Amino acid sequence: MAEPFVVFGASGSGSVPIEAALSLIDVPYRLEDFAPWEGQEEADRLARINPLRQVPALALPTGELMTESAAILIWLADAYPDARLAPAVTDARRPAFLRWMNFVSSAIYALYWITDNPARIAEDEAVQADVKTRVFDRIATCWAQMGAQLRPGKYLLGEDLSVLDLYVATASRWSPGRRRFYEVAPALGETMRRVDGDPRLAAIWAERFPFSPGWER
Ligand SMILES: N[C@@H](CCC(=O)N[C@@H](CS)C(=O)NCC(=O)O)C(=O)O
């Protein structure tokens, strides 16, 4: 029998939408948690899986390893079309799907490499604080762009929940936080609240990214 999927991730991280997608697809997977931000030893342990020392990563049943959250989510949705987690290649919504999946990954998610540890780009602590503020402003601007251009139905791309909804529901909870997201992208708020409250996702959210008191910030 082929190995099950293995998710290399962490609570509240970019592995959460992947775990959510796997649970909606209903395929077995094993979780291996890593927290590379906790220190060199943990980062080096992860380097044996992903030399870039980042989560998420996904080991496929073939043994191949994938990194990059957007690529993993798109691949899972395409590999399991019966779960209907992405518009098909010929669907009119496919260009928007690919556009916004890549936008979240490249315009937003990539910036956390700076904000998680601004000492990576600036020595001075006052400069670091300023960099964080400015980068969070940039992230809010990106959410505003998405909110101004997407016309959600029940979900971001219409009537079907897609991996884009899982991705945005997770990333929009990271700093500068969901409250600011609602302010800058009001058109997306109702959809995100629907995804937060989806009963099919309740167990994943509770275990991997709980809505603890004050979570909206
Ligand atoms: N481009 C990557 C970004 C992954 C990423 O930034 N992961 C964070 C956790 S949410 C991480 O591992 N940070 C540790 C580090 O960059 O040192 C993706 O989309 O998967």
Image (cartoon, rainbow, N blue to C red):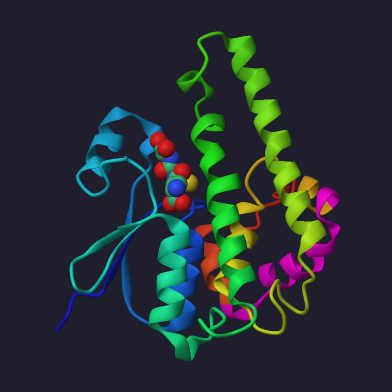
* Majority SS type along the magenta span: helix
Question: Which image quarter has ligand 1?
Answer: top left
Q: Residue furthest left?
A: 1
Q: Residue furthest bottom?
A: 82
- Residue 66 coordinates in the image, percent (x, y): 31, 60
Asked if residue 26 lies left or right of residue 98, the reply is left
Residue 187 among magenta residues: yes
Q: Residue furthest top?
A: 124
Counting every numbered tag in the picture gives 0
Q: Is residue 99 above or below residue 105?
A: below
The residue range painted magenta reads 183-200
Where, quadrant-wise, is the N terminus in this rendering? Answer: bottom left
Give the residue displayed 26% in from the left and 32% down from the top. 41
Give the residue displayed 82% in from the left and 49% down from the top. 184
Give the residue displayed 64% in from the left and 82% down from the top. 92
Where, quadrant-wise, is the C terminus in this rendering? Answer: top right
Q: Is residue 145 above or below residue 119?
A: below
Q: Is residue 210 above or below residue 5?
A: above
Asked if residue 101 lies left or right of residue 48, the reply is right
- Residue 190 coordinates in the image, percent (x, y): 81, 68
Q: Nearer the viewer, residue 183 or 214?
A: 183
Quarter residue 90 falls in = bottom right
- Residue 76 coordinates in the image, percent (x, y): 41, 74
Give the residue displayed 49% in from the left and 19% down from the top. 119
Q: Is residue 45 above or below residue 11?
A: above
Q: Nearer the viewer, residue 153 or 96?
A: 96
Residue 167 among magenta residues: no
